[in-house]
Amino acid sequence: MSRSPERQAQLSRMEEARRQIQRQLDMIDRQITRRMTGLIPQLQPRRTSYRRGKPPDPSAFLERYRSNLAAITAERQPEIDALSRKLARQDNAIAAFRDRYAIAHSQEATS
């Protein structure tokens, strides 16, 4: 079925808006990763001698890492949730638009 230029333009705008939201989510993920990478040296145990012959506990590092990651993620969670909901709405709107006007996915159309 041939696509009208107006419908194609509208679909392109909808897909671009969706890509922008996805880029925002990816940017938040990179920011969290960057902050955690900066915290790693502070999370590692001090390089002192073993206390009473006991080696440092490797699980303690993982616990500190996970708790810091949870805290940093919790700071951004409302923003992540809002963007995720918006992304889901956009996916639904794009799918409904494609169904309404019988437009195939661009990957399917090129195959």
Image: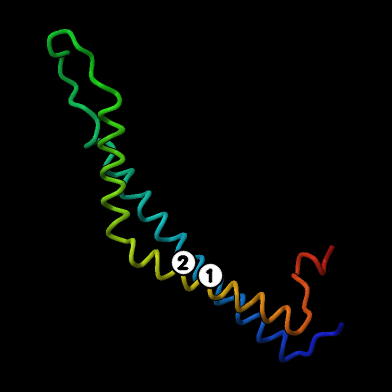
Residue 111 as seen in the image, left or right of residue 33 = right
At which x and y percent is residue 33? 38, 49
Q: Which residue is mark 2?
A: 84
Give the SS element for disc 1: helix
Q: Amino acid at mark 2?
A: Ser
Residue 104 as seen in the image, left or right of residue 32 = right
At which x and y percent is residue 79? 36, 67
Q: Is residue 103 above or below residue 47?
A: below
The foreground one among 21 and 48 is 21
Figure quadrant of residue 77: bottom left
> How many residues crowd mark 1 within 10 Å: few (<14), some (14–19), many (20+)?
few
At which x and y percent is residue 11? 67, 81
Residue drawn where x is 48% and y is 73% of the image: 86
At which x and y percent is residue 18? 56, 73
Give the SS element for disc 2: helix
Residue 87 as seen in the image, left or right of residue 105 = left
Residue drawn where x is 41% and y is 54% of the image: 30
Q: Is there CB contact under 8 Å for labels 1 and 2?
A: yes
Q: Residue furthest right?
A: 1
Residue drawn where x is 43% and y is 61% of the image: 27
> How many residues crowd mark 2 within 10 Å: few (<14), some (14–19), many (20+)?
some
Q: How many marks?
A: 2
Q: Which residue is mark 1?
A: 88
Coloration of the structure image? rainbow
Q: Quadrant of the C terminus?
A: bottom right
Figure quadrant of residue 93: bottom right
Q: Residue furthest top?
A: 53
Where residue 45 is drawn, which disc sits there? none
Q: Amino acid at mark 1?
A: Ala
Separation (CA) of disc 1 from disc 2: 6 Å
Q: Quadrant of the N terminus?
A: bottom right
Residue drawn where x is 53% and y is 75% of the image: 89
